[in-house]
Image (spheres, rainbow, N blue to C red):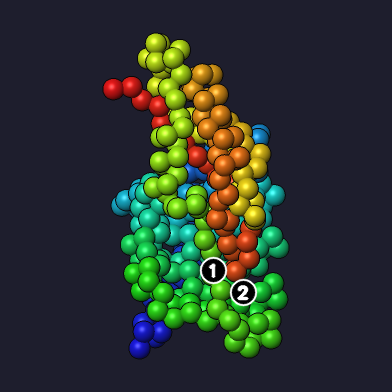
């Protein structure tokens, strides 16, 4: 009964999705190679927004490369909060469907399927309110194989709380910024490699040179002292980009 219910939900949502695609986007945003918002001249990716008629927080985001390659097609209950609701479709570099997910009120709820490049089913998981209740993985010839993780973001050793503790212990408010009452959020971007190493740290959002340098100093210290738990995609360790914000405030 569960599978039938989820299949019916998918059918209803897909009908609504196909209707939305015929519309012109209500808004367009441009992003660079690191997914930082930019102008059309420097863009590598484009997000097209389609809002519901009676609620501009609700709608769909279709993401493409500037060459027109489709990357994702995702429905949202609340776009501002990134609360997914309905189908989320993801595509590979040749425009083939790589994965399909179903969300309800921001939580995975229904089938999650992924595919090999030839279209063969790679996995079939079922979720209820973000909890996986069934998980199966398949070989390239369709035979059952050992289950492996679908996706996992990189994490600091010990989790987010340990990351916060490391930053709080090692970040010092620059005297110049304190004297001038300079506050704000500095963002340092870097890659977490497949072996858990921090690579290519760079300033992504600047506030003041003194704060920027302090945030970078802490990340380079972290680079020497901590090995992250790397990201996983379809059971494989992968390198991913990570943005780390530093909030400087004076009470």
Q: Which is more N-terminal, label 1 or label 2?
A: 2
Task: Judge by depth and name the residue closer to the eye, 211 or 74.
Answer: 211
* CA neighbours of label 1 inside 10 A, class few (<14), some (14 to 19), many (20+): some
Q: Residue at x 50, y 49 (%)?
A: 156
Residue 35 visible (yes or no): no
Coordinates of residue 165 in the picture (x, y in percent): 40, 41
Relative to residue 4, is residue 223 drawn left or right?
A: right
Placement of 132 over or under 85, stated as above or below: below
Q: Which residue is the site of mark 1? A: 150
Task: Judge by depth and name the residue closer to the eye, 243 or 146.
Answer: 146
Whole-Å distance between the Cαs marked 2 and 1? 12 Å
Q: Residue at x 44, y 60 (%)?
A: 75
Q: Quadrant of residue 140?
A: bottom right
View extreme (front): residue: 225
Mark 2 vs mark 1: give the one in front: 1
* CA neighbours of label 2 inside 10 A, class few (<14), some (14 to 19), many (20+): many
Q: Quadrant of residue 37?
A: top right
Helix, strand or loop under label 2: strand
């Amino acid at each position: 009964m569960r599978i039938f219910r989820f299949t019916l939900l998918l059918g209803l949502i897909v009908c609504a999705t196909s209707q939305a695609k015929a519309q012109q986007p209500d808004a367009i945003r441009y992003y660079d190679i690191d997914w930082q918002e930019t102008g059309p001249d420097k863009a590598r990716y484009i997000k097209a927004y389609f809002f519901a008629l009676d609620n501009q927080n609700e709608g769909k985001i279709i993401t493409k490369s500037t060459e027109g390659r489709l990357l994702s097609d995702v429905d949202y209950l609340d776009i501002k909060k990134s609360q997914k609701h309905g189908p989320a479709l993801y595509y590979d570099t040749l425009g083939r469907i790589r994965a399909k997910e179903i969300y309800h009120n921001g939580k995975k709820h229904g089938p999650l399927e992924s595919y090999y490049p030839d279209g063969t089913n790679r996995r079939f998981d079922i979720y209820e309110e973000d909890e996986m209740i069934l998980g199966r993985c398949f070989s390239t010839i369709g035979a059952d194989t050992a289950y492996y993780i679908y996706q996992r973001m990189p994490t600091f050793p010990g989790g987010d709380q340990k990351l916060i503790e490391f930053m709080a212990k090692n970040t010092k408010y620059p005297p110049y910024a304190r004297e001038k009452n300079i506050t704000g959020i500095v963002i340092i971007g870097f890659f977490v490699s497949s072996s858990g190493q921090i690579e290519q740290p760079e300033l992504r959002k600047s506030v003041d040179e003194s704060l920027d340098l302090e945030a970078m100093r802490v990340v380079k210290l972290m680079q020497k002292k901590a090995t992250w738990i790397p990201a996983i995609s379809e059971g494989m360790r992968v390198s991913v980009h990570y943005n780390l914000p530093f909030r400087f405030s004076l009470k």
